[in-house]
Amino acid sequence: MLLKFLWEKEFQEVLGSRKLLEALGVVRSDGTINYPVVMEILRLASSDEYLKQRIIKFVVDNFREEVKKAIGLFPYTVTLHWEKDFENYLRYEKKGKKITDEGTLKDYKTLFIKYLEGKELTPQLVEYVVKHPK
């Protein structure tokens, strides 16, 4: 009865975000998410440019690495190991200057084993390698 005297903004402030989501059916009373409702909101976003941009910004800000993996910008799991095939690639198939000096190849292998062997390829590892003095 009293609700008809409240402006929508006042009503939202009274309920708070969580209660508002429950009242709208986005979150059930037990705290679980009503996925069909959320998916419908996302479908609506595809026709509302402002909402679409807000969702994209939120996703990029909060799920950057997951987005990269999802669109194939970064592989899911690549674990680095020095293998004979990689050594052959450096010697014979590498574009540009191939590694023909055994000492240089040995140095590369030593550095690889020390810093990269068994590590997962991630953007952070790439950044580390790029900034590494050697």
Image (cartoon, rainbow, N blue to C red):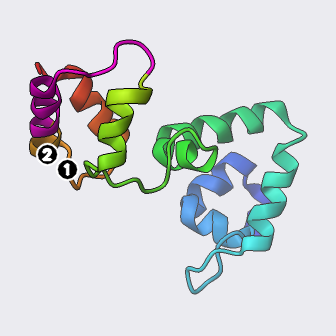
Q: Position of residue 38 (x, y in %)?
A: 74, 63
Q: Are marks 2 and 1 in contact (CB under 8 Å)?
A: yes
Residue in the foreground of this view, choosing between 73 and 48:
73
The answer to whether 109 appears left or right of 36 in the picture is left
- Amino acid residing under circle 1: Glu
Gap in angstroms between the C-alphas marked 2 and 1: 5 Å
| Residue occupying the point 17% across, 30% down | 105
Residue in the foreground of this view, choosing between 93 and 53:
93
| Count of picture labels | 2
The answer to whether 111 appears left or right of 8 in the picture is left
Instruction: Please say whether residue 104 is one of the residues in the magenta stretch.
Output: yes
Secondary structure at badge 2 equals helix
Which residue lies under the disc numbered 2? 113
Image quadrant occupied by the C terminus: top left
| Residue occupying the point 49% across, 41% down | 64
The answer to whether 89 appears left or right of 55 in the picture is left
Which residue lies under the disc numbered 1? 117
Q: Which residues are magenta?
A: 95-111
